[in-house]
Image (cartoon, helix red, strand yellow):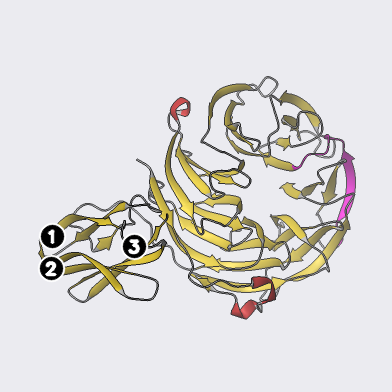
Amino acid sequence: MRFTVIVTLTLLFSLSAVPLAAQPSEGLTLVGALNPHNANYADLWGYTAPDDTEYALLCVSGQGLSIIDISGATPVEVGFVDGLGDSFDVKVYGHHAYLSHNVGPIQIIDLTDPSNPVQVATHDALGPHNIAIAGDYLYTVGGDGAGGLRIYALNPDPMDPQLVGTYEPYYYHDVLVRGDTLYAAAILGQGIDIIDLADRSNPSLIANFNYPGSGAHNICSTEDGSHVFIGDEIGSSGNWTRAFDVRDPENATLVAELIVNPNAVVHNCYGKDDVIYIGHYDEGVRVWDAHDPENPVEIAYHESGGAWTVYPYFASGKFIASDISDGLYVFELDAIVANEPTAPGAAFTLEAAYPNPFRTQTTLRFTLDTPSDARLTLYDALGRAVAVLAAGAHEPGTHTATFDGSHLPSGVYLARLTAEGRTATQRLTLLR
């Protein structure tokens, strides 16, 4: 089943000029923000010191790496390391940070004293664009040459990574490592390669999957690895996040599309506890409940002008995001209600329309837990009722209504279900 979820905003903001307190948000708390340098910003990662103090490691384009203490009410920059180029990505192994620049060597930085970070080594890894660390291995992609996958051992000496294997059929932009399986995003149209790492000296292809007009940029997954989420940055068929069922790797299936705005460009995503955190260039930070990965639901957002990435893995529950212009944001997510599938008759719900967006017809399903006088009405963006899809007495259980929008103009519409004093809504987008 393919399920499309869309959230479209009816107000547009020039967020780069909007004060932080005025930036729209919902479902999360903005703990603090810091713009420590007069520069643009790129990726970030988190580091937790042995005393449990939490730090953001923020890439400052053209300058280096900012180390920011986020444990208090106000983020504070406590250390800085000059970069060797245009800092793009950073990851952590133990008390060492690895900073990549797209060209030139990786910097290896000792974080034993975050207020006095020290570059202890550099490593010529062919100038990778992105890096990942999982277990005792460093994975680099997007470097010189083919730009494929290179694997380095960090044990026994994290200051002297040793090349143990390569897999370079073409350019990879980013990777996700899960145990002995790696997912590689081939951003230039080749889709996603699933690679066997059982023998890291000789990685081998398990399967490839793709979708029309792909520009796969970044990958994250559910906790059990049954589904992966692919962010598309440069493809020709929509630059949003797509969910694939990969339980059968040779027959990966597109099951959902996470669309905030059809014209917006997504960047990086990370998953924790079946919640997907996404950085959007145009739509800020978006958070989706993916407990039911084929029916993901957006549960929180904070709009800014150019979110690059997120890091949701702090034990405190805080998560951080980098914004190209604004620097660092620190958030706390409000309580999560798991989006579990519900048996007919067990709840009062209005499901998202399918398909959505749609061109002529779409279908909505709603569930009633008691006998109810129910009414399902569709409104346009001005609040005018344009159709009544269901009205009258309904028995408990799941009901279906079909909407034909062939006589209506393109735009955003709101479906509202009312029954016995309760209300549920869903947004629909009609395209021409």
Q: Which residue is mark 2?
A: 372
Whether residues under marks 2 and 1 lie with C-beta atoms below 8 angstroms apart, the answer is yes
Q: Which residue is mark 1?
A: 396
**Residue at 82 percent of width and 35 percent of height:** 125
5 w.r.t. 246: above or below: below
> In front of the other: label 3 or label 2?
3
**Residue at disc 2, secondary structure:** strand
Classify residue 191 as left or right of residue 170. Answer: left
Classify residue 235 by image quadrant: top right
Work out whether mark 1 precedes mark 3 in sequence or the reverse, and give the earlier one. Answer: 1
Alpha carbon of mark 1 to alpha carbon of mark 3: how far?
32 Å
Alpha carbon of mark 2 to alpha carbon of mark 1: how far?
7 Å
Residue 312 visible? The answer is: no
**Residue at disc 1, secondary structure:** loop
The 10 Å Cα crowd at callout 3, few under 14, some 14 to 19, many 20 or more, is few
| Residue extent of the magenta highlight | 116-129
**Residue at disc 3, secondary structure:** loop
Number of numbered discs visible in the structure rendering: 3
> Looking at the picture, which amino acid does disc 1 mark?
Pro
Classify residue 131 by image quadrant: top right
Give percent across and percent down for residue 254: 44, 39
